[in-house]
Each structure stands twice: as structure tokens, then as C-alpha cells.
Image: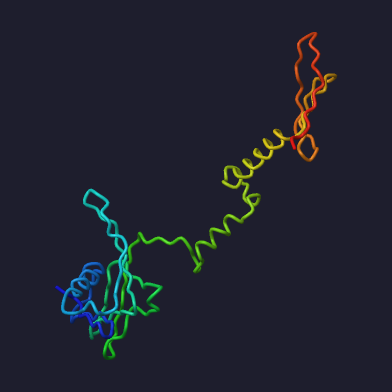
Amino acid sequence: MVKFEFDGLNKLFIAKLGVTNVDVVVDLYSDWKEELQLSNNMKWLQAMRVIGGDPKGAGQWAGATVFLMNGWKIRPYEANHTFTLDGDLWLDQATHPGPMFVPTLGGYSVLIQLKLSTLVETIATGGGDPSVIADAVWDEPAADHVAPGSTGRSIVDIAALVDDLHDEALGKWVLNPSTSKLTLYRLDGSVMQVFNLKVAVGDVPPYVERAPVA
């Protein structure tokens, strides 16, 4: 049973008399595609697009999300009733300023219910641009997030390790034969580490200094 009349001139999906429950994918999107095959309906602006619906195997399919486009709207039938749409139906933000519904022809009271899927996900709140949010995350000082076991703590520890390796490779090493101590200096001249070396009896180590590599 086709539940809507399609008015391409006024860009309306008009619910037929007695239609109170609509499956967004079956009764709206699929029937609209079939309507396009009739007469010269391809001349009208595209009414909808869909994402999802891909096969996942084992007889299962990914959920579909339908977007109304180009100013197309839905009009319930003329009577007091509750009009329920079951499925993910949204406005295409690039082509449809809204609203999604228009009033009935006459002073009827219609309660509209949208039964959306619980699988719809968002990654940004407050209208934030995801690229801006990502930039803000990367610009956040890691030192402000150093709780034990946190990613910030790991980043700080790794950065410190890289600095140590850099100074160890390019800084000055001094081996003092009188104390048998090896001192490692950072590039800024500060002491990085001091090692006490064990020397075999009778073996006097030479005094060694390694200047920083230019």
C-alpha cells in the first residue's frame, strides 16, 4: 500500500487518509524511488538521499538514514490524530533549511512522533567544527593532563626520554680517572647523569673528554 501522494510541483509528501504510521525507508524513501519511474517525475528536484543500508552478512543490514532535500516536506492527512514516523529521518543541512512538516489543510490537531534509531552517533556538540575541535585537542598542553596512566602522562614521559637521548648523544662526556666517575652533560652544560665506574686493580683509565658534536 502506497501511503503518500507525491506533489512534485509543491515538493510535498501528502499522507493518504488514515495513514498514521510510516516506515521511513519502506513507505517514504522506497515508494518515492518507485514514483520516479512513473510519467516524467524525474523532472522534479531530488527529494531524498540515504546513507547506510549496506549488507553486513548473516542476513543482517546496516541501518539506513534518510535525508530530506531541496525543500521537500511532509503533510499529514486532514484529521485529528498522531502521526508516527519510524526510522532515521533528517534534513539535509546543505539543501534544506526546514521545516520538515507543513500544517494540514484545516484546523486539525496532529501530534507528530519521530522514532529515531539509537545507533545515530555524533562527534561534535554545540555546532562545533570537527576540524577546529581536532586542532584544539592537538594544541592542548600535554603537561596539563599528566594523571598517572593517562595519554598526556605518556606523551610527557616519551618527550622527556627523547630529550635525554638527544642530550646523551650530542652532549659532553667526561671520564675522571682520579674518581672513576663518568659524567654526562646536557647541551646546555648542566649535569645529566653521573656514573661510578668499577676499575680492575692496576688498570688506570685514561682521562677522556668528548666535546659536543657540531
Residue furthest bottom as drawn: 106
Image coords of residue 146 (percent x, y) = 63, 47
- Reply above or below: 188 against 23: above
- Reply above or below: 32 against 8: above
Image coords of residue 156 (percent x, y) = 64, 44
Residue 100 appears left or right of 153: left
Image coords of residue 184 (percent x, y) = 76, 31
Image coords of residue 54 (percent x, y) = 27, 56
- Reply above or below: 5 against 180: below
Front-most of residues 119 and 179: 179
What residue appears at the point 77 percent right and 22 percent down from the top-left corner?
A: 196
**Quadrant housing the N terminus:** bottom left
**Quadrant housing the C terminus:** top right
Front-most of residues 76 and 199: 199
What residue appears at the point 35 percent right and 59 percent down from the top-left corner?
A: 119
Displayed quadrant of residue 29: bottom left
Instruction: Count the numbered circles shown.
Output: 0
Residue 152 appears left or right of 3: right
Front-most of residues 202 and 149: 202
